[in-house]
Amino acid sequence: MKIKCPKCLPKEGVEIPNFTLKHKQEIIQFLDNSPMNAINYIKAEFSINSTEAKFIVQHINKIQNRCNRCNFKQLDNEYGICPKCNSLNINWKR
Ligand SMILES: [Zn+2]
Ligand SMILES: [Zn+2]
């Protein structure tokens, strides 16, 4: 699946790997410790480049259903564009 963010480069978006629930949980755990660890983990596990891994990690919500950028609190899709600030949110279950 390809995800795009109207606010960020690359404009054409990033193809995201088929993350399992376990991957998502692991990535979130890494992210809570250090975004760099989450990026390195995704790069190592899924053979994608730094730009793509960074793009994914930057868009994962720190709090579920809450936009990282503007704090809008009612996001409901797993991958969606915030209706308030128009940025991509990866809204994984926590
Ligand atoms: Zn973005
Ligand atoms: Zn927002």
Image (cartoon, rainbow, N blue to C red):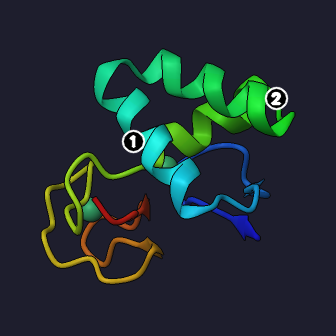
Q: Judge by depth and name the residue closer to the eye, 93 or 10.
A: 93
Report the side of 9 relative to 58 (left or right): right
- Farthest residue in the right direction? 47
Q: Residue at x 51, y 18 (%)?
A: 37
Q: Judge by depth and name the residue closer to the eye, 85 or 62.
A: 62
Q: Residue at x 76, y 55 (%)?
A: 17
Q: Answer with the quadrant where ligand 2 appears in the image.
A: bottom left
User: How many numbered discs, if any?
Assistant: 2
Find disc 2 in the rendering and name its residue.
49
Task: Tell me the kind of residue under disc 1.
Answer: Ile
Picture coordinates of residue 84 (x, y %)? 24, 72
Above or below, comparing residue 46 to residue 60 in the picture: above
**Nearer the viewer's eye, disc 2 or disc 1?**
1
Tell me the quarter of the picture where residue 9 sits: top right
Q: Quadrant of the C terminus?
A: bottom left
| Element under disc 2 | loop
Mark pair 2, 1: CA separation: 19 Å
Q: Judge by depth and name the residue closer to the eye, 20 or 91.
A: 20
Instruction: Please report contact status of discs 2 and 1: CB closer than 8 Å, yes or no.
Output: no
Picture coordinates of residue 46 (x, y %)? 80, 39
Give the numbered dot on residue 28.
1
